[in-house]
Image (cartoon, helix red, strand yellow):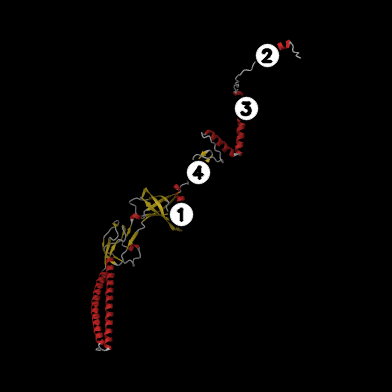
Amino acid sequence: MNTTSEHDRDLAAKLRSLSIEPAAFKTELPEPHIRRHVIPGAMLALVATVSLAVFLFYRPEALERIETMLAGFASSDPAIYIRGAEAPAEDGAAVERGRALPADEAASPALPTREVTGSGYVVAPDIATVFSKYEGRIVAVEVEAGDRVVTGQVLVRLDDAGARFALQGAEIARQSAELALTAKTIELAQARSSLTRTERLAGRDAMSAQTLEEAKTAFDTAENAALQARQDVAKAGLDIDRAREQVEALTVRAPISGTVTRLDAHVGDTVLSREDSVRENESLLAIADMATMVIDADVAEANIALMLPGLRGEAVLDGFPDRPFAVEVSKIAPMISREKGTVTLRLSLSSPPSDMRPAMAARIRLLVGEAGDSTDHQQGAEQ
């Protein structure tokens, strides 16, 4: 049963007519009052900073993660690499802390370059000290110090009357031996003819056996005498060769090609034979091959582990300090100098000064570790 009265219905209609429908509107935040919030905001920022510092002090890995995340957000690459995570890179390089490393840089870090210095002298390994083979008197000197000579060139001429007389005597002795050989050969021919005749007569019983035996003995004696004469001729020939060699040796010739670096021969001097000369100043001269000069330098024994054949560097001569040139280690001495505590290196030269001379002082500088030199040489030595 509906008990709603007319009055109630009118009241409900009026209420509906007075109701307000919800409308869309935009709400704007009120403008913050800066002055009112400055002090509380500053205090809040200070507390946050202190808390973050304490957190990072006890957790240093968090700082790395934050830096990595910030770098990833800042970069244009959408992939964010975090330390410890493996991610493929387009170029196949190792990636650490959000950046890609070159493959050679990640595999082999550059070695520091180290210098090893030393000092030494220019050496001519091919040097000949010229002596006289036999005693004699100098009659001519054909060269001067600084001259360029070739193998076989005449350097000094000596004279020895005894050597010349010995040659003449040997020639005469050979002539006598040849005459004796001729006579013995004639006697041998006669003995052979007599033996033949005796054998023929003995075959017809016209000659006694004793006569035949005497003919055979005479033939054997003549044959031995002829053989001895031939040996005497050969011996005379050897005596001539020996005497001629001594005379020819009085003309001293260059044993090698090079430059005359020292000359001690003077006309009129009497020189000793090579066997009797025991000091270098008793020699005639010295020749050095300037085309094959090297440097023998000493470096500290502490650096011997770094020294390997093929190690490169540069050298400078005290006479030409403004003209450095390249050098390379070719040999390492097998012994250490106990007095100096050094090891001697032999270095080959590349484009040295053209007027470089033996015994010039030199200073060297070797680079160890440059462009992987020491590593490559060590691997080669181990192989």
Which one is closest to the eye, mark 2 or mark 4? 2
Numbered tag placed on residue 40 in the rendering: 3
Three-letter amino acid code of the residue under disc 4? Ala
Whether residues under marks 3 and 1 lie with C-beta atoms below 8 angstroms apart, the answer is no
Mark 2 → mark 1, Cα distance in angstroms:
106 Å
Q: Is residue 281 visible?
A: yes
Q: Earlier in the sequence, mark 3 or mark 1?
A: 3
> Left or right: where does residue 36 sit relative to residue 166?
right
Considering only vertical position in the picture, is 48 above or below 216? above
Mark-to-mark CA distance, 3 and 4: 50 Å
Q: Nearer the viewer, residue 251 or 224?
A: 224
The kind of secondary structure element at disc 1 is helix
Q: CA distance from mark 2 to mark 4?
A: 81 Å
Please report contact status of discs 2 and 1: CB closer than 8 Å, yes or no.
no
- C-alpha separation, residue under disc 1 versus residue under disc 4: 26 Å
Q: Residue under label 4, please give it.
A: 106
Q: Badge 1: few (under 14), some or many (20 or more) residues near its Cα, within 10 Å?
A: few
Which element is circle 3 on? helix
Q: Find residue 240 and report its horizontal and vertical position in percent.
A: 27, 71
Q: Secondary structure at mark 4?
A: helix
Total numbered labels placed on residues in the image: 4
Residue 203: percent from the left, percent from the top? Answer: 26, 86
Q: CA distance from mark 2 to mark 3?
A: 49 Å
Q: Earlier in the sequence, mark 3 or mark 4?
A: 3
* Amino acid beneath label 3: Pro
State the residue position of label 1. Answer: 381
Above or below residue 206? Residue 233 is above
Mark 2, secondary structure of its residue: helix
Density class for disc 3 (Cα within 10 Å; few <14, some 14-19, many ≥20) is few
